[in-house]
């Protein structure tokens, strides 16, 4: 892929080592900050196409001034090992690892090989993705694990990290850290100088400690990376061609769907119908859909691996944000689990994510006692949904345990694969009738549950049975048309 950069952009050589052709343009036509962001944007999408490669060349201190850090305050990281003549023989990096219980510090070396006229380089290292992060100057993150094996490169500011033994390390602009403490007690991190901090996160494949060190790119991987970069450039051009909210057009909505496909289709239909009802004529919503293979996500749900569900949501969120979406919706109740949802919010801090439980709670004004139905992940005493309803002053009632188990089975075994039996619909209506005897309302806390209600039943239960998918889609319409 060809990447445009200013002549002064310090990333030009770094990008060139990855096999991309850099086209220099005049500095007057593009500020260095914007050029860096564009180059990184294309590299990020190339990385997400599949196992891509990158090369460590030199510390990134030269970038810090472009992100508001001023001149480099000096390295706190060990200088790379050198030959007798002073030339480094390897890139040495601080290594944060764990033994399954405790985290500890060490160092790891990446040997240099000759790079010809451009200097010495390590072997190419495969990666699973690249994230660009900004953190507030008051950042102070208590005990946590790394969500994945990753290399972190600091662009500005200073940060301190400590482990359970009390051992502490400090990192400044241009320094890199290999983080692999994904288990055990984890570590604490805090900002030292009170400035907003920019950093780059490079995710590493999960195939064993440093097994990726001498990996080589395949032709297929390079081709996928090139295609992804070109696609990303096209998406960027589309997003930049239409300013946010220009000309009274609806805001662009991003849908994270496929969980399950049937309810995602309903979301798309309801959002477009809502826009058309308000604007008339042939108007429709501006929407972009990221659709998952639901089998892979449901497998993670059943295993309670919510951090990995969050990583999948974050991947979708980043793609939709890059496509110019101004708000996101996750078209599924269960994956709004607090761990997964928070991972999505952290991935796209500048794009609002409309929470399905908040949209539902807002529609329950005047209700006091509500029954909550859904999967086992949603309809339980301590679920994210029950907690958000209680924060609005609502009393949450659950169905009998046997009925909840049967509904969970119906959802996963039948509704998610578009199977709707008359017997199941009759059973479900009977449960609604029993719950409405002792509750003001019933919340359908699964986006597929409305499939069990025919048109007559929906009309009969209007005002007392609340479908979360319908309310969530309505919230998206209001946001798109700037009604709230």
Image: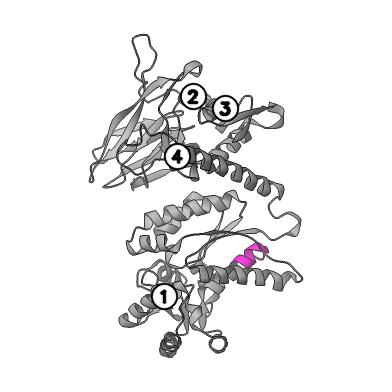
Residue reaching furthest front?
A: 219
Magenta span includes 5: no
The residue tagged with tag 2: helix, strand or loop?
loop
Q: Return the x and y of residue 318 as percentages of the image width and height.
A: 53, 50
Which residue is more in the foreground, 83 or 439?
A: 83
Using the rendered image of the protein, determine whether residue 136 is visible from the camera's viewpoint. Answer: no
| Marks 2 & 4, CB-CB < 8 Å contact | no
First-in-chain label (1 vs 3): 3
482 in magenta: yes
Q: CA distance from mark 2 to mark 3?
A: 20 Å
Closest to the camera, between mark 2 and mark 4, is 4
Q: Nearer the viewer, residue 290 or 171?
A: 290
Q: Which residue is mark 1?
A: 411
Question: Left or right of 179: which side holds 331?
Answer: right
* Disc on res. 201: 4
Residue under numbered circle 3: 12
The residue carrying pointer 4 sits among few (fewer than 14), some (14 to 19) or many (20 or more) residues within 10 Å by Cα, namely: some
Q: CA distance from mark 2 to mark 4?
A: 20 Å
* Alpha carbon distance from label 1 to label 4: 38 Å
In the image, the segment drawn in magenta is 476-483
Q: Is residue 407 left or right of residue 106?
A: right
């Amino acid at each position: 892929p060809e990447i445009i950069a200013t002549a002064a952009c310090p990333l030009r050589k770094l990008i060139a080592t990855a096999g991309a052709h850099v086209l220099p343009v005049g500095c007057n036509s593009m500020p260095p900050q914007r050029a860096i962001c564009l180059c990184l944007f294309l590299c990020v999408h190339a990385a997400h196409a599949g196992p891509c490669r990158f090369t460590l060349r030199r510390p990134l201190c030269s970038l810090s001034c472009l992100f508001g850090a001023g001149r480099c305050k000096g390295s706190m990281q060990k200088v790379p090992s050198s030959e007798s003549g002073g030339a480094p023989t390897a890139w040495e990096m601080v290594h944060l690892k764990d033994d399954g219980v405790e985290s500890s510090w060490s160092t790891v070396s990446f040997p240099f090989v000759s790079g010809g006229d451009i200097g010495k380089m390590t072997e190419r290292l495969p990666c699973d993705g690249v994230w660009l992060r900004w953190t507030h100057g008051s950042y102070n993150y208590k005990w946590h694990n790394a969500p994945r094996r990753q290399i972190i490169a600091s662009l500005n500011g200073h940060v301190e990290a400590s482990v359970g033994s009390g051992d502490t390390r400090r990192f400044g602009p241009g320094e890199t850290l290999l983080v692999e403490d994904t288990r055990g007690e984890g570590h604490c991190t805090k900002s030292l100088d009170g400035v907003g901090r920019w950093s780059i996160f490079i995710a590493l494949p999960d195939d064993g400690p440093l097994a990726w060190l001498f990996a080589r790119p395949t032709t297929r991987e390079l081709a996928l990376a090139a295609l992804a970069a070109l696609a990303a450039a096209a998406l960027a051009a589309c997003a930049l061609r239409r300013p946010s909210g220009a000309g009274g057009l609806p805001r662009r909505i991003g849908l994270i769907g496929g969980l399950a496909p049937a309810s995602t289709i309903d979301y798309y239909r309801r959002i477009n119908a809502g826009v058309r009802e308000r604007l008339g004529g042939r108007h429709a919503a501006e929407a972009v859909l990221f659709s998952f293979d639901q089998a892979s996500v449901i497998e993670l749900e059943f295993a309670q691996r919510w951090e990995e569900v969050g990583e999948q949501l974050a991947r979708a969120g980043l793609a939709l944000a890059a496509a110019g979406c101004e708000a996101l919706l996750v078209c599924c109740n269960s994956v709004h689990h607090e761990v997964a949802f928070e991972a999505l919010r952290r991935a796209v801090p500048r794009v609002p994510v409309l929470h399905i439980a908040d949209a539902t709670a807002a529609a329950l004004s005047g209700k006091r006692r509500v029954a909550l139905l859904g999967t086992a992940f949603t309809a339980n005493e301590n679920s994210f949904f029950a907690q958000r309803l209680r924060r609005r002053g609502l009393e949450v009632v659950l169905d009998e345990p046997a009925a909840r188990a049967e509904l969970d089975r119906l959802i996963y075994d039948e509704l998610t694969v578009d199977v709707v039996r008359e017997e199941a619909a009759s059973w479900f209506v009977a449960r609604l009738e029993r719950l409405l005897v002792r509750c003001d309302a019933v919340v359908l806390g699964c986006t597929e549950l409305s499939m069990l209600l025919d048109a007559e039943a929906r009309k009969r239960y209007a005002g007392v049975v609340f479908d979360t998918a319908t309310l969530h889609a309505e919230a998206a319409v209001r946001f798109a048309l700037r009604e709230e």
